[in-house]
Image (cartoon, rainbow, N blue to C red):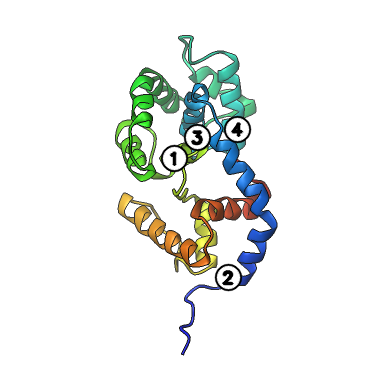
Amino acid sequence: MKRESPYREVDELRRDYAGSRTRIRARLEEFARVPQAEYFYELVYCLLTPQSSAVNAAKAVERLREADFLSRDFDPSVVLFRKEHYIRFHNTKAMRLLEAKRGLPGILAALGEESSPPEKRSWFVRNVKGLGWKEASHFLRNIGYRDLAILDRHILKNLRRHRIIRTLPKSLTPSRYQSIERRFRRFAEELAIPMDELDLLFWSRETGEILK
């Protein structure tokens, strides 16, 4: 007797993926082409997104780039506080940006090490203040690393929809994050669709866009 799948709405998911696959893969290819000179600002973006909108974070990054934050010494909190792209906890995040800038040589060295994407993520969580598991996964995905899940609320909502998880977690401890990621990976393997492609598909379902 054929074993009944524990998942649900899989056929609908396959149809959604077939319709978005080309755009999703093109986006992942764009991430893989990000030059090393842009890594710092990709990191800045991921340090700014927690508890702030992705759109505001992107606008703030552009203002910091225009002001040449990487090469010039100034307090970035002034930029983060601007009403048109306000970043919550701007003072704390400004300190995190300054720490990341000081630590950039070590960050680039860590990226150059022969290690797997999960190993690199663990290094970033341990060594870059302001990066949790989700943010470290986000940063690495945005510069071309694969096979990492970015477990934000959009993704978790879809994982519950397809019964990969039964309930939405109230918090994501490191062990809980990794447990959900393992379930997500098993689901992706069963469907023969890369996990990070499903990640982008779930995001686009909720937002209508395939963003960073």
Residue labelled with disc 1 = 135
Establish if 187 lies above or below 49.
Answer: below
Q: CA distance from mark 3 to mark 4?
A: 20 Å
Three-letter code for the amino acid on which mark 2 is drawn: Val
Q: CA distance from mark 1 to mark 4?
A: 16 Å
* Disc marking residue 10: 2
Q: CA distance from mark 1 to mark 3?
A: 13 Å
Asked whether the beta carbons under mark 1 and mark 3 sit within 8 Å of each other, the answer is: no
Three-letter code for the amino acid on which mark 4 is drawn: Asn
Q: CA distance from mark 2 to mark 4?
A: 34 Å
* Depth check, front residue: 146 or 126: 146
Q: CA distance from mark 3 to mark 2?
A: 30 Å
Residue labelled with disc 3 = 143
Front of the two marks 1 and 4: 1
Q: Report the quarter where the C terminus lies.
A: top right
Q: Secondary structure at mark 3?
A: loop
Three-letter code for the amino acid on which mark 1 is drawn: Glu
Q: CA distance from mark 2 to mark 1?
A: 28 Å
Q: Label 4 neighbourhood size at 10 Å, few (<14), some (14-19), many (20+)?
A: many
Position of residue 47 measured from the top left corner of the image (x, y, whole percent): 46, 32
For image coordinates 67% across by 54% down, the residue present is 20
Position of residue 209 measured from the top left corner of the image (x, y, whole percent): 67, 46
For image coordinates 46% across by 36% down, the residue present is 139
Mark positioned earlier in the residue sequence (3 or 2): 2
Front of the two marks 2 and 1: 2
Establish if 136 lies above or below 45.
Answer: below
Q: Is residue 87 toward the left or the right of residue 115 in the image?
A: right
